[in-house]
Amino acid sequence: MISRTPAAPNTTGAEALVDANAATGTIAGTVQSIFQYRELLKHLVLKDLKLKYRGSWLGFVWSLVNPLVMLIVYVVAFKYILGVRGEGFVFLLLLAILAWTFFSSSLSMSAGGIVDNGALIKTVAFPRAVLPIASIFFNLAQYLLTAAVFIPLMLLLHRTPPSVPMLLFPVFLLLQVALTVGIGLALATGTTFFRDIRHFLEIALSVMFWTTPIIYDFNTISSPWQWLVLFSPLSSYVLAYQRIFFYGEWPGVAVSIIAVAYALVALSAGVALFSRYEREFSEQL
Amino acid sequence: MATFIDIQNLSKRFLLRRNRSGELKTRFLGLFYRDRREVIDELWALKNVSLTVGQGESIGLVGRNGSGKSTLLRIAAGLHRPTSGHVLTRRGVRIATLIELGVGFHPELSGRENIYLNAAIHGLSRQDINEMYPGVVEYSELHDFMDVPLKNYSSGMQMRLGFAVAAHLDPDVLLLDEIFAVGDEDFQKRCLKTVHRFLNAGKTIIFVSHAAASVRAICRRVCLLDHGELLFDGDVDAGLGAYQRLLAASASAPGAEPLPSPATSEIDAAAARESVELDGAWHRLAVGGLWDEVGTSLFEFLKAQGLRPHHYVLDVGSGSFRLGVHLIPYHEAGRYIGLEANEDLVRAGAEIELPRVGVNPQSVRVVVADRFNLTGLPQVDFAVAQSAFVHLSLNAIAQCIATVVRKLAPGGRFFAAYFENPDSANGEAIVHPGGLKTHADAEPYHTSFEVLAGICAGVGAHAERIPDWKHPQDQRMMMITRRVDT
């Protein structure tokens, strides 16, 4: 026989009942629920980091090898084969490559954040935004680890003294994270309904690679093209990193305005789109 | 009792797309071939369902495949959005959903890492997880495997770990899909024990299941869904009875009504196939063939005569539960009494037929005896001899009527079927429509109403013909009541 003892004091009245569906679908609801599930976010990021290096000899060193090899290839190709001259080419290239790798891998991973986790989404209720955001944070962690090695190294090699503008680095990094989260959430939503988006993303990223001042110096291109490049999604952030670290100067008004505007627009649009369609994911998978 | 979940006029429509036009190819081909065009079918998985769940309740959601019970569970869990209607939950009540064990487990992570990840997926805070962790390890009995990657676990160990995490989530409401269906007996027992502990702590459970035995073991209330509608909401025995009738109806008339999804029709077809195959089994043939038809028709007849779940009913010659499979789920527990001389038939029925309709054979009262000795049994409102008279000599029939009539409660009625011999003077065998041959002096016996009425008069009973009973094999029906002396 089952005997029952009420666990909580019985308070009756309809006002204590809330519609669970009213809270979800709003931007505030989404943001709040992600914060509630920060423990899950942490564990998902840790899982990806652990799994990436588990069983390999070099472990974390592999994260340094990838940008290093890319750096060497570009330096050989541009500086020695094509004979491109320019002050601090390697340093500028490195800052851009690190930021670009963070951006592009984050978007590729977060686009599949929902569709690749079908079983989980169909069986457990939790804020789905945690999934794409976790893959962005995983890439952010990788970025921070590599940047923490390479940027001080470059500063030493170039004998660049620390300067006040460098304090802006966390601000622009935060803005880049906001931009990436916004686009990543939008892509994760879109891919759930249209799988083509992943293929489109690949093409868009390879175009964007050339519209971002990565393997060329922004200052060496002519003025109308400068504006075009400046409005490419990641350019303002790359320029900001290059200016504060290499040139030791402030990022400039145009770059700052574009960086802030892009981050805010992308983040709010991404979160709004995601919250609007979040409840339909489980039926689409 | 505080209301925890209040489901109001909930409806859910699914759009089933065939040839999804998400692909350009489909659009292009659709221009030329009609059958390549996108087709959107509407499926109303839930229609206007209202349900209130109070604190400490244990509700079984039963229904056939495709009846909408899982959809209801998923909407209550917040996995699907209702098309219309509302799901209100009490502020601060924690709801956990267990639809599948070990979802989100990663094979490369160790047991410990998986516990932390899984608990976090269910929304536990770091402090909660740290507190529950030792309990999970102990419960799973996998102390020595916590640092081993999950890929090296056996499937049984993975299941144990999955349930161990689930058992320690400690929500106020647990939404449970049929997760016990997997796993061995030991695992199921352990699950059941945990669920009971959970209920004893005043927690609330909504449990989706096909298995009447699990529902009986866990639930105090049953909600029956069919084609998205809530057909029944009430106590367990009546609810499961209604569910069994629904199953019986769909098994005897497969395809009689449009089936909601391919998955459903496959399963129903399998059930129907199984039923047909069983028709060749000895325990069904031994009682005269047409097992399902006779049982169903007699059951419908008794209901038309006023049989209700609270009545006590005596099944004389219960055999392999041809009628029992209908009556036992229909009646309140303990109201059905079977009487049968052939122990092998009873055993075959208990092993094959009763589990098929979800009845636990242990819970059924059957007197196995070849004498009509009914001492110690309660008085009954209904007695029925579906084919006893066909297998008994007149002498035994007289003994049977005399004993049963004395067991009838005031107003009680005894229905008995028999093969009629229209001409008592004729001693030859009779071939009935349907091909069965009956005899006056050998099984299967025939007799006549006049003879039976005479016996009744001799033992203080009154006999009456029931003319409008259509038996598939041409048996006739009579009603015997205790004679009231005026």
Image (spheres, rainbow, N blue to C red):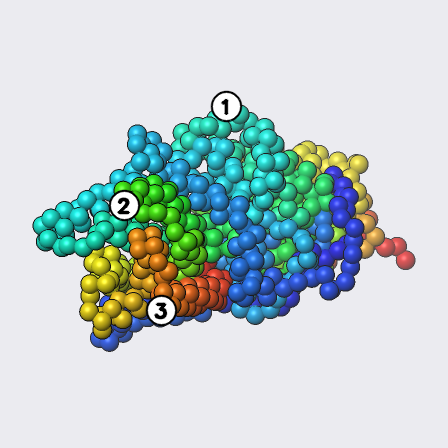
Q: Nearer the viewer, mark 3 or mark 2?
A: 2
Q: Residue at x 42, y 31 (%)?
A: B149
Residue at 27%, 71% (x, y): give it. A227
Q: Residue at 80% across / 45% down in the picture?
A: B379
Comparing B94 with A34, the one in front is A34
Across and down, in percent, residue B301 comes to: 64, 58
| Residue farthest right in this picture | B486
The image's mark for residue B144 is 1
Q: Position of residue A6 (x, y in %)?
A: 77, 46
Q: What amino acid is found at the position of numbered circle 3 in the picture?
A: Ala
Quickly name the residue at label 2. Answer: A158
From the viewer's perspective, is the residue at label 2 or at label 1 nearer?
A: 2
What is the residue that sits farthest to the bottom in this orientation? Answer: B31
Question: Which dot marks residue A254?
Answer: 3
Host chain of mark 3: A
Callout 1 environment at 10 Å: few (<14), some (14 to 19), or many (20+)? Answer: few
Q: Chain of mark 2?
A: A
Q: Secondary structure at mark 2?
A: loop
Spot occupied by residue B26 in the image (x, y as percentages of width and height): 27, 68
Question: Quick one: label 2, few (<14), some, or many (20+) residues within 10 Å?
Answer: few
Point out which mark residue B405 bears.
Answer: none
> For this view, does A11 lie left or right of residue B290?
right
Task: Decide which of A279, B35 is in the foreground and name it.
Answer: A279
Could one spot residue B76 in this view of the protein?
Answer: yes
The local secondary structure at tag 3 comes to helix
Q: Chain letter for mark 1, please.
A: B
